[in-house]
Amino acid sequence: MITLSTEAAAAVRTAMSRAGKPDAGLRVMIETGGCAGNKYMIGLDAEPRPDDAVIESGGVKVFVDPQSQPLVVGLTIGFTETLAGKGFTFDNPNAEASCSCGKSFG
């Protein structure tokens, strides 16, 4: 369902370590908003909720709520570092359109 690149998985593991939450997982949610209609929301979560899908990718647990699941099938999360900054990237085959920042899709 969701794949983390090697760089994204390393970034999440680093964040978990810095937060003192080595057993946490990465929560991926889709919310209405952003330039293109839907926006990605990610963050660390201590454990999955009862109705979450739990995926493991790159040694990281990923939690996805039922409403977001159909919108993230096939999603690849990457991580880049450039002169302009660093952050997660999203390659979503379900996106018919996306904004220039890459953080929202329609």
Image: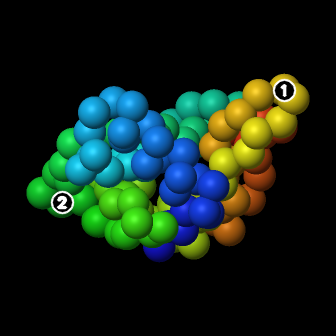
- Identify residue type, mark 2: Asp
Label whose residue precedes the other's in the sequence (1 or 2):
2
Residue under circle 2?
51
85 horizontally vs 31: left or right: right
Residue 11 seen in the figure: yes
Q: 96 or 59, which is in the foreground?
A: 59
- Identify residue type, mark 1: Ala
Helix, strand or loop at mark 1: loop
Among the 4 quarters of the image, the one containing residue 84: top right
* The label number, if any, that marks residue 58 in the structure image: none
37 horizontally vs 101: left or right: left
Q: 81 or 32, which is in the foreground?
A: 81
Query: Where does residue 25 sit, x and y in percent of width and height?
Result: 32, 51
Q: Residue at x 37, y 47 (%)?
A: 27
Residue 66 seen in the figure: no
Residue under circle 1?
84
Q: Residue at x 69, y 59 (%)?
A: 91
Query: Where does residue 8 sit, x and y in percent of width and height?
Result: 58, 53
Give the class, few, some or many, for how many residues have Cα within 10 Å of label 1's Cα (few <14, many ≥20).
few
Among the 4 quarters of the image, the one containing residue 70: bottom left
Q: Residue at x 46, y 42 (%)?
A: 14
Helix, strand or loop at mark 2: loop
In the depicted structure, whether residue 69 falls above or below residue 20: below
Among the 4 quarters of the image, the one containing residue 37: top right
Q: Between tags 1 and 2, which lies in front? A: 1
In the depicted structure, whether residue 67 falls above or below residue 88: below
Q: Residue furthest top?
A: 84
